[in-house]
Amino acid sequence: MTSRENLSQSRVLILGRKQEVLDGILGQLRELGLNVRGSATPEHADTEFDAREFDLIVFGSGAVGPLSERLRREFARRNPTVRFLDAFAPIAVRQIAAAVSGRPDLLEDFATVADGAGVRIRGTMREPSTVTVTLYRLVEGGVDPEQLDRSQVGSGQYEFPVTAETLAGGQVLVVTVGEDEFHLYKITSLAAAS
């Protein structure tokens, strides 16, 4: 099956909070040929939608914490094969398109380890590729991305440290492998992990 066929055959549900952001993402994904639906009231999603009608359920940053955990449990109970994705609005369209493409991740076993010095990004590269680490900060009127690193990385173990000082004021670290594989680390979890 080609990537374009994967896109058109995948059934995607997006849950967020901001209707205008949701509408923009839905519109762009429909232009790509995705069968996508969405809701800006995620607290009712488990009664509004049947998990068996979806292959991928996407949680925007407004649908996190205990709500996300409850919905994941309920959706997985109804459809054990459904996949979940945490999305970040500035890159959500690319994240979702990559998730439904069917390509395996090049960076396997992605993990972040928080300690007093900051966080270490870890994983195993299946084959050489470019890895970019970008920090997103909230600013008035949107987000401000700061590229922390862009390197050609070989096969094998990958690790990249980010200091607590660098993370200060940040919302999300995005690790991009190649141009269309994304791994997220929500920085708010740093305080809880320390």
Image (cartoon, grey):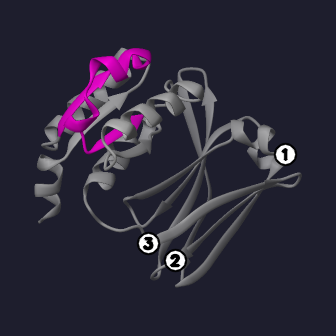
Q: Which stretch did the figure color magenta?
A: 35-59
Q: Give residue 103's quadrant in the image.
A: bottom left
Q: Amino acid at mark 3?
A: Leu
Residue 42 colored in magenta in the image? yes
> Residue 104 vs residue 169: left or right?
left
Residue 42 locus on image (x, y percent): 41, 20
Q: Residue furthest right?
A: 116
- Which-is-in-front pick, marks 1 and 2? 1
The residue carrying mark 1 is: 194
The residue carrying mark 3 is: 106
Q: Looking at the image, which residue is at 59% across and 29% down?
A: 65
Residue 191 visible in the current orientation: yes
Q: Residue furthest front?
A: 77
Q: Give residue 51's quadrant in the image.
A: top left
> Residue 69 vs residue 56: left or right?
right
> Residue 68 vs residue 32: left or right?
right
Q: How many marks?
A: 3
The residue carrying mark 2 is: 125
Q: Amino acid at mark 1?
A: Ser
From this view, report whether residue 103 is shown above or below residue 66: below
From this view, report whether residue 123 is shown above or below residue 51: below
Q: Amino acid at mark 2?
A: Met
Q: Nearer the viewer, residue 56 or 138?
A: 56
Q: Please, what secondary structure does the residue beneath circle 3 have?
A: loop
Q: Nearer the viewer, residue 136 or 117?
A: 117
